[in-house]
Amino acid sequence: QKEVEQNSGPLSVPEGAIASLNCTYSDRGSQSFFWYRQYSGKSPELIMFIYSNGDKEDGRFTAQLNKASQYVSLLIRDSQPSDSATYLCAVKKDNAGNMLTFGGGTRLMVKP
Amino acid sequence: DVKVTQSSRYLVKRTGEKVFLECVQDMDHENMFWYRQDPGLGLRLIYFSYDVKMKEKGDIPEGYSVSREKKERFSLILESASTNQTSMYLCASSGRDRDEQYFGPGTRLTVT
């Protein structure tokens, strides 16, 4: 089992819809959770982080964390073609110091 | 605004050459990281540093070394480049007691 798992996709949604991206992790002691967006040929860009169970909203983005079920999700409301990218989930495991463990990413395609 | 810069966007080197990749951050961050990213393999940590002159091996340190003589600068060295080191190299940094990492633009290295 991978430490951080994401469906590689592509996840295809129509413009204006809600895109839902999911990530599961294996280390129950994981503390911090991050979502990065990576456009093709570019470097990852931090878009959200969440530490506590529940929802955290930032503009069109909502991160959801459920530690009991060991999953974290990212919702993108009113999806735009410019949201088409690969979304990486990253987790700080317990006793990992300053290191993050990254999932393989989910490719999102928003169709006009 | 965090800024992480890398010395080159694209680099082409020959097998056996010594290669230096440089990363500079301007946010006085303690932690710096070098990753490589390959299709299907995701982001893999090569080395990281949590202080000047300190370094720790990541998941795939073989064939690489690092240097951190100043807080803002972290160099990745390929002692004798090989074709299997053709990859996208990404530098990242994070502050003390902060887990979120900020990435530079990346260097796409081709070894022929």
Image: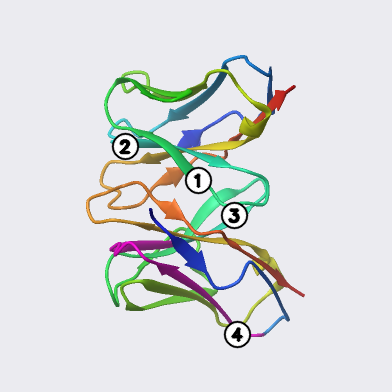
Q: What label does residue A45 carry, if any?
A: 1
User: Which residue in the rendered view is the most extreme toward the bottom?
Assistant: B17
Tell me the amino acid under the disc marked 1: Glu
Q: Looking at the picture, how far across and down is residue A57, in whole percent?
A: 38, 23
Q: CA distance from mark 1 to mark 3?
A: 14 Å
Q: Which of these two is toward me, A18 or A71?
A: A18
The kind of secondary structure element at disc 2 is: strand
Q: Which residue is mark 2?
A: A32
Q: CA distance from mark 3 to mark 4?
A: 20 Å
The quarter in which the C terminus of chain B is drawn is bottom right
Q: Looking at the picture, how far across and down is residue A92, in whole percent?
A: 34, 42
Q: Which residues are magenta?
A: B17-33
Q: What label does residue B37 carry, if any?
A: 3
Q: Which residue is mark 4?
A: B18
Tell me the amino acid under the disc marked 2: Ser
The kind of secondary structure element at disc 1 is: strand
Q: CA distance from mark 1 to mark 4?
A: 30 Å
Tell me the amino acid under the disc marked 3: Gln
| Residue A8 makes an appearance in the image | no
